[in-house]
């Protein structure tokens, strides 16, 4: 059931000249959620965001906001606020003027402006900087001013276009937490563009993964990571990337080159139902636990190269001539030694080779889980959360 | 050893810098000599000027006295000022508005219109002189300062200069204003003009000086001495019947120079920054 403030793309297309940047996009963004538009550069995620903002026209299809088609509604009438990658602060205005400019231009009451100003200043710890100009601020402070300016409008939609990409790693972590907090205060609909999968995983209630103008997967961070719908999603999310291994189904066994696997019943059923014979087997590096030598019902190869990440080890080995990565705590042997592993069948993905789509996931994976696992999934399905301090709970008029 | 090496590598650069500085000093001298000559000579008598001495043996203010007695010089200065200010204000306003439209609006034929506008910069004055004269004459504006002003209310070079500057304003600044539902006039007034202020001021100064020094067009339009501009007044002493009065003419030149020079000194920083950012040499 659609809420009034939902944003709905109905078969939307966008072309620049002859290039199609968005193809047949159907996307339903729910009121009050944090939706992440994720994908490699040039995938159309920023264009999608700019179409919501009204900064980009829609070539065909329909964009619905507040229950109405807004294709021809100008940007200023859509009730969106936005944070740009480079913050777009007015260079000649102080922090105070930057934050209050729109409110003043629309002749809001002075007291109301001051009240809202003080509130965002407090949230972002900017009280001491009100009279500074953007060039006198650090990157992190500018980013917070941009966010404060977007929030002071109290619009129902907040669009963020890679707002953290100009910050260093430490500030980014802090800013991520702040963003989640801000969302818990205001409960605006967040639409957040990023190419950084960690940001996407940590900030999103749901992730919309895009490639070349197409929506590849739309789901919770948990499912995008643990239940990828296609090869692209499996490879894009997670670092190092998911290993994708060619496999053929023959005589009740899954053959990967010279190795073959006997799959549990739950997977066999799905493979038979797919009526395909050629597949890709996906296994994340952290789910490969290598040991020396060869054993039954396992895959293996020769160690090529070993990397030390500090907390973990990256072991690169060759299986049927292809490079496979394992991330583990121990090293099974030096380079050149032969190793093998038996996959943990709760943590494998199987994709049809032709379509590169997943054959699905056995329902058993979600039924036979421990109480602890269930609790963890329930918490994670709502996205990241921050504990709000007593003094931080500010009453917000909505 | 080390210091020797350093000296060796530093020396050629140093030599080149000296060369550049000498060249620049030479250029400054070439530019300054006529001005100094005019200034010094305006305090000489005609006789001393012909003597060829560098400095006057006796400073005389007769040349300035002669100007004051033979011409309504205050009225003439006022005329020049009114013309220059009106022309400058109109050109700056029209250029700013047009440049804004060319940079931030999308409309059909934008590039074609811009191309034709820029072409007008290359049309020589002599081509438009006669049609303009006829228009002004038909409007009964001959021998009126508004006749001088009328054809100069807009200028493509100003549009060009300001468009170049406005193009450097980051798009998101405009987009964020659009998202905040700010009208175009307010964006122009509160965002673009403050950001582009140095460029706008220096464009204005260029217009002002050009208009101040304008000679041919006022000669065609203005007839009576009380309507003259300063550059026209100079000519009074160059072809009067008693021969060319060089020292008085040079004194007149000094008077003409005073105001633009003062303005330049005040706004020097803005002018330099505009030319540095637009990549155009003055």
Image (tube, rainbow, N blue to C red):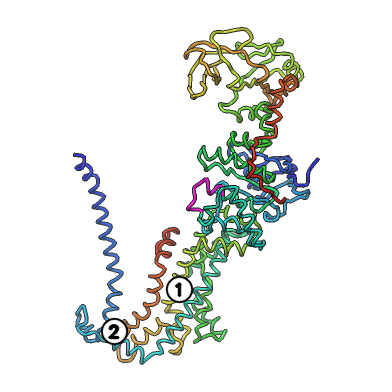
For the record, the magenta segment spans A134-144
Label 2: which secondary element: helix
Label 1: which secondary element: helix
Q: Chain of mark 2?
A: B
Is there any visible trace of residue A44 in the rendered image? no
Q: Chain of mark 1?
A: B
Residue B125 in the image, given as x and y percentages of width and height: 46, 73
Residue B208, labelled with which disc?
Answer: 1
Task: Name the residue that disc number 2 marks.
Answer: B247
Residue A140, magenta (yes or no): yes
In the rendered view of the protein, which quadrant contains the N terminus of chain A?
top right
Residue A305 in the image, given as x and y percentages of width and height: 48, 19
Binning the other alpha carbons within 10 Å of mark 2 as few (below 14), some (14 to 19) or many (20 upward) gives: many
Residue B190 is left or right of residue B271, and the answer is right
Between circles 2 and 1, the one closer to the viewer is 1
Q: Residue at x 61, y 28 (%)?
A: A235
Extreme right residue here?
A1
Toward the viewer: B203 or A155? A155
How far apart are the two marked residues, 2 and 1, measured between alpha carbons? Answer: 27 Å
Residue A15 is left or right of residue A363, and the answer is left
Binning the other alpha carbons within 10 Å of mark 1 as few (below 14), some (14 to 19) or many (20 upward) gives: many
- Secondary structure mainly formed by the magenta segment: helix
B67 versus B253 height, above or below: below
Q: Residue at x 58, y 26 (%)?
A: A241
Contact between marks 2 and 1 (CB within 8 A): the answer is: no
Extreme front residue here?
A390
Residue B126, magenta (yes or no): no
């Amino acid at each position: 059931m659609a809420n009034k403030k939902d944003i709905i793309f109905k078969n939307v297309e966008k072309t620049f000249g002859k290039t199609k940047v968005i193809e047949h996009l159907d996307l339903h963004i729910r009121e009050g959620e944090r939706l992440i538009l994720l994908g490699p550069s040039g995938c159309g995620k920023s264009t999608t965001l700019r179409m919501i903002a009204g900064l980009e026209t829609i070539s065909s299809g329909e964009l619905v906001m507040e229950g109405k088609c807004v294709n021809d509604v100008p940007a200023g009438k859509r009730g969106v606020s936005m944070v740009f990658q480079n913050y777009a602060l007015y260079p000649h205005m102080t922090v105070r003027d930057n934050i209050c400019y729109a409110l003043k231009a629309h002749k809001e009451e002075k007291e109301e402006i001051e009240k809202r100003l003080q509130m965002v200043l407090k949230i972002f710890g900017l009280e001491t900087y009100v009279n500074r100009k953007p060039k006198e601020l650090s990157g992190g402070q500018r980013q917070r001013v941009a966010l404060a300016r977007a929030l002071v409008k109290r619009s129902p939609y907040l669009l963020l276009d890679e707002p953290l990409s100009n910050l260093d790693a430490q500030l980014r972590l802090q800013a991520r937490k702040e963003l989640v907090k801000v969302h818990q205060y205001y409960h605006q609909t967040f639409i957040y563009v990023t190419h950084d999968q960690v940001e996407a995983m940590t900030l999103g209630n749901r992730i919309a993964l895009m490639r070349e103008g197409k929506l590849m997967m739309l789901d919770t961070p948990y499912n995008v990571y643990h239940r990828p719908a296609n090869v692209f999603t499996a490879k894009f999310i997670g670092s190092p990337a998911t290993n994708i291994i060619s496999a053929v189904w023959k005589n009740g066994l899954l053959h990967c080159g010279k190795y073959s696997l006997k799959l549990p019943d739950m997977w066999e059923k799905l493979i038979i139902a797919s009526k395909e014979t050629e597949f890709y087997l996906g296994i994340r590096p952290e789910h490969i636990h290598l040991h020396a030598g060869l054993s039954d019902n396992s895959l293996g190869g020769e160690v090529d190269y070993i990397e030390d990440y500090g907390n973990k080890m990256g072991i690169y080995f060759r299986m049927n001539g292809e490079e496979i990565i394992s991330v583990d705590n121990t090293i099974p042997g030096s380079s050149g030694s032969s190793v093998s592993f038996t996959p943990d069948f709760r943590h494998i993905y199987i994709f049809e080779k032709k379509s590169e789509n997943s054959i699905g996931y056995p329902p058993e994976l979600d039924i036979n889980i421990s109480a602890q696992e269930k609790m963890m999934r329930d918490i994670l399905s709502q996205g990241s959360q921050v504990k709000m301090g007593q003094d931080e709970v500010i009453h917000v008029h909505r | 050893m080390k210091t020797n090496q350093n000296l060796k590598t530093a020396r050629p650069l140093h030599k080149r810098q000296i060369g550049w500085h000498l060249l620049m000093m030479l250029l400054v001298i070439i530019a300054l000599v006529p001005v100094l000559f005019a200034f010094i000579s305006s305090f000489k008598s005609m006789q001393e000027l012909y003597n060829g001495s560098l400095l006057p043996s006796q400073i005389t203010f007769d040349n300035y006295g002669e100007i004051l007695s033979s011409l309504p010089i205050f009225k003439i200065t006022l005329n020049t000022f009114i013309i220059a200010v009106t022309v400058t204000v109109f050109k700056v306003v029209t250029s700013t508005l047009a440049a804004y439209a060319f940079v931030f609006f999308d409309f059909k034929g934008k590039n074609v219109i811009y191309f034709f506008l820029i072409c007008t910069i290359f049309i020589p004055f002599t081509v438009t002189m006669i049609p303009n004269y006829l228009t002004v004459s038909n409007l009964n504006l001959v021998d009126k300062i508004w006749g001088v002003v009328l054809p100069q209310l807009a200028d493509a070079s100003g549009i060009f200069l300001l468009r170049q500057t406005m193009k450097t304003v980051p798009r998101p600044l405009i987009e964020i204003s659009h998202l905040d539902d700010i009208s175009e006039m307010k964006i122009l007034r509160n965002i673009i003009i403050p950001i582009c202020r140095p460029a706008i001021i220096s464009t204005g100064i260029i217009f002002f000086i050009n208009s101040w020094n304008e000679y041919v067009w006022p000669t065609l339009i203005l007839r009576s001495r009380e309507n003259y501009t300063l550059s026209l007044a100079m000519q009074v002493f160059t072809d009067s019947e008693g021969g060319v009065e060089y020292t008085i003419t040079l004194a007149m030149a000094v008077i003409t120079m005073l105001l633009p020079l003062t303005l330049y000194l005040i706004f020097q920083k803005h002018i330099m920054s505009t030319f540095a950012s637009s990549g155009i040499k003055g």
